[in-house]
């Protein structure tokens, strides 16, 4: 069975500070992993994905994520947070054809 | 890039009426469309998978007769909430898979049943 876990319901960070949103996975075979962002009353927007290759994946809006096979993690990071980064973030895994989403993490960036 | 256009973005309807939500793929053909329901404060629940020209596959616990899904063409999938009740009020989102493994999401529909 595939599962993706986002252990934090909410992450608070001050503007300008680095941010990390955590994700761990349990996906059979080679995992396809994704991060999506959702702004209020909007659909999800694709940020980045890991399929194969370099463990450090760079995506939209300055975000990046590091695939760590030994820790089965795929944490989302950004060196310097912006207030406009405040949104809901979803990690997703694709072990089969249908993606499995984490429960979501609310990121709040304080001015 | 690929875009899925979802309409309406917001709808308010009276209890007992039906509401249709449309998702159109622009500039690409969507043979498959996933329909999700998002409950307050987050979690995305997969409701069903529609495939062009065939019956939708519903997840366990989702009422097929209440949530009618039609995927009659390669660019259009619809979700009809029949005999809507206040408990059906939610945010509904469609999503189409892309080559390369990622997914394009519609902008969502906020349904309020009064």
Image: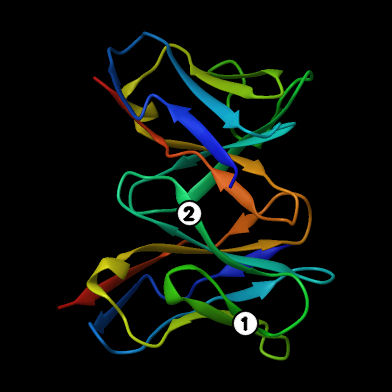
Indicate which label's residue lies in the foreground, 2 or 1.
2
Vertical position of residue B93 compared to residue B74: above or below: below
- The residue located at (78%, 75%) in the rendering is A52
Viewer-nearest residue: B70 or A16: A16
Is disc 1 placed on a helix, strand or loop?
A: strand
Q: Quadrant of the N terminus of chain A?
A: bottom right
Depicted A71 relative to depicted B41: above or below: below
Image coordinates of residue A69 in percent, x first then y, are 73, 86
Residue A105 in picture, x, y percent from top left:
40, 67
Report if the CB atoms under discs 2 and 1 are less than 8 Å apart: no
Quarter where residue B88 is shown: top left
The chain that hosts pointer 2 is: A
- Where's residue A96, x and y in %? 79, 55
Which chain is indicated by disc 1?
A
Choose the circle earlier in sequence order: 2 or 1: 2
Q: x and y percent of residue A15 in the render?
A: 23, 82
**A101 in relation to B74, above or below:** below
User: Which image quadrant: the C terminus of chain A?
Assistant: bottom left
Identify the residue at image location x=43%, y=45%: A43
Q: Residue furthest left?
A: A111
Return the mark for residue A50.
none
How crowded pointer 2 is (Cα within 10 Å; few <14, some 14-19, many 20+) is rated as some
Occupied quadrant, residue A79: bottom left
Left or right: A4 with respect to A26? Answer: left
Q: Residue at x 48, y 54 (%)?
A: A45
The CA span between labels 2 and 1 is 21 Å
Mark 2 lies on residue: A45
Task: Write down the residue under mark 1.
Answer: A73
Q: Nearer the viewer, residue B89 or B107?
A: B107
């Amino acid at each position: 069975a595939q599962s993706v876990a986002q252990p934090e319901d909410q992450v608070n960070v001050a503007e300008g500070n680095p941010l990390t949103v955590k994700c761990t996975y349990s996906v059979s075979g080679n995992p396809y992993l994704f991060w999506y962002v959702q702004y209020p009353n909007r659909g999800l927007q694709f940020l980045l994905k890991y399929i194969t290759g370099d463990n450090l994946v760079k995506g939209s809006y300055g975000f990046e994520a590091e695939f760590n096979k030994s820790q089965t993690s795929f944490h989302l990071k950004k060196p310097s947070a912006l207030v406009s980064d405040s949104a809901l973030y979803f990690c997703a895994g694709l072990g089969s054809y249908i993606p499995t989403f984490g429960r979501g993490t609310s990121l709040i960036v304080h001015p | 890039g690929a875009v899925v256009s979802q309409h309406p973005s917001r709808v308010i309807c009276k209890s007992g009426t039906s509401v249709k939500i449309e998702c159109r793929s622009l500039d690409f053909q969507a043979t498959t469309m996933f329909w999700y329901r998002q409950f307050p404060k987050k979690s995305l629940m997969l409701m069903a998978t529609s495939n062009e020209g065939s019956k939708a596959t519903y997840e366990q616990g989702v009422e097929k007769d209440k949530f009618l899904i039609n995927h009659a063409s390669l660019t259009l999938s619809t979700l009809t909430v029949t005999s809507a009740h206040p408990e059906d009020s939610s945010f509904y989102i469609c999503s189409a898979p892309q080559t390369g493994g990622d997914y394009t999401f519609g902008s969502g529909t906020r349904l309020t049943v009064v």
